[in-house]
Amino acid sequence: MRKWIVAGNWKMHNTISESVRLATEIKEGITDLKNGEVVVAPPFTALQKVSDALRGSPVALAAQNMYFENKGAYTGEVSPVMLKDTGCSYVIVGHSERRKYFSESDETVNLKALKAMASGLKPIICVGETEAERNKGITEAVIGRQVRAALADVSVEMLAGLVIAYEPVWAIGTGKVASPVQAEEVHDFIRRLLVEIYGCMAEDVRILYGGSVTEDNIAELIAIEDIDGALVGGASLQAGGFLGIIGKMP
Ligand code: PGA
């Protein structure tokens, strides 16, 4: 049985005090987490204070990005050692906004995923097609390329510490959530691809859906066998909406 994950990606939102307030409200709203995990990804500046605020709660901490070296002359970057130091256990890697605005490539996504796992951080590796790619009928080709590239040199033993998030680019922040059928097709495709590469161990990898998830649409998505949770942007910025999504988990 795969444990579900609901992860909130706060993106470039919230000062330190706003982040602590939101994290505290989430912590106070969560009672029992037997079958799943809740993760929040505040901006870098708030990681330490949110980590302090979450102490004693089951809510896990994630960063939204990292660099693939431990230290060095890399102005502006943050290393896995630094993230671990703040209490992070997860890191989002290859979000489509990183790919689009910050030239993240399949190759750097792979380097970051490998480095994260070597450092004891669980990467949430994001993949997704654009609207133009879907319209051209090349969704599976794009997702297949992104998944294979992200997992280059990832051994079967490393799979347990890894999460994939399918986030159709056209669904992110648009209010246009993928239909259950659209999401199911791609999740099933990713699962089959993982099984092709890794065999039956691939059944343990969690695959999250992301893109305009709210408490109103999560129920029909989580009902799908290969959807193991959600990566949530906009709806994770208010405790009520985020807790509403968590409340719909099995
Ligand atoms: P959204 O963002 O929920 O606001 O669509 C999801 C994401 O970018 O992870």
Image (spheres, grey):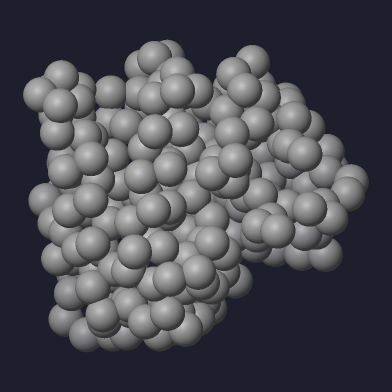
The reply to whether residue 67 is in sight is no
> Quick check: 206 left or right of 174?
right
Of residues 3 and 58, the one nearer the viewer is: 3
**Is the residue 51 above or below the residue 140 in the image?**
below
Q: How many marks?
A: 0
* Residue drawn where x is 28% and y is 23% of the image: 170
* Residue drawn where x is 82% and y is 64% of the image: 56
Position of residue 198 measured from the top left corner of the image (x, y, whole percent): 39, 72
Where on the picture, by quarter, is residue 223?
A: top right
**Is the residue 76 above or below the residue 19 in the image?**
below
Image quarter in which the N terminus is found: bottom right
* Residue drawn where x is 23% and y is 51% of the image: 144
> Quick check: 186 left or right of 34?
left
Image quarter in which the C terminus is found: top right
**Is the residue 118 above or below the residue 86 in the image?**
below
> Quick check: 232 left or right of 12?
right
The reply to whether residue 71 is in sight is yes
**Is the residue 44 above or below the residue 118 in the image?**
above
Position of residue 55 measured from the top left corner of the image (x, y, whole percent): 76, 64
Q: Residue furthest right?
A: 31
Position of residue 212 measured from the top left corner of the image (x, y, whole percent): 46, 23
> Quick check: 208 left or right of 129?
right
* Residue drawn where x is 78% and y is 47% of the image: 27
